[in-house]
Image (cartoon, rainbow, N blue to C red):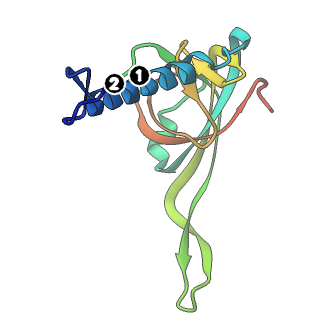
Amino acid sequence: MIIDRQGRVAGKVSLIDIALVLIVLGLIIGYGYRNLSRTAVQIVASNTKFYVTFIVEPIRNFSIEAINKGDIFFKQYEQQPFGVVADLRQEPAREIIKHPDGHPSYVVMEQKFSLYLTLECTGNISDAGYFVNGNLQVSEGGDMQIQSNKVLCNARIDKISTSMGG
């Protein structure tokens, strides 16, 4: 008899112990297969220029006046430059209000603006996306805190393009 009355194989190892070891081995093998079977990221262009347009809103006019073409911006708390200001334009900031009947409408905010800030960045373009400074992935719709030597602001990435107007 291989299994005794206490559920041990050959009187030494419990069936529960064997089951646990098999489950752990299965998890390790599954994790390894999942991570090792991924296709490698293919770099389409390395050390290339692309343009990231941020929307900063709402922002006051004195902050906009502190930003100039050619200024260097960083991701907050980072040492390497994120990009150089290539273009900026502003529009009156708007907010959504709900009327008593429930329908929403836009209302211009007094003395506040939406700033479209385009930075010229250098990095890699791959099939997985755009990467600044080697490992900082940027994607449309993402939020980021960016700063220059004069301004710190919360921004949302509006678009990314390989050409200035695109």
Q: Does residue 73 appear in this view?
A: no
Which residue in the protein does label 2 denote?
Answer: 21
Q: Residue at x 65, y 23 (%)?
A: 130
Q: Residues within 10 Å of mark 2 (few under 14, many from 20)?
A: few
C-beta proximity under 8 Å, tags 1 and 2: yes
Secondary element under disc 1, as helix, strand or loop, is helix
In the image, residue 153 sits, relative to residue 95, either above or below, namely above
Q: Which image quadrant is residue 20 in?
A: top left
Looking at the picture, which amino acid does disc 2 mark? Answer: Val
Q: Residue at x 55, y 53 (%)?
A: 113
Q: Nearer the viewer, residue 166 or 140?
A: 140
Q: Nearer the viewer, residue 15 or 97?
A: 15
Looking at the picture, which amino acid does disc 1 mark? Answer: Leu
Quadrant holding the C terminus: top right
Q: Residue furthest bottom?
A: 101
Secondary element under disc 2, as helix, strand or loop, is helix
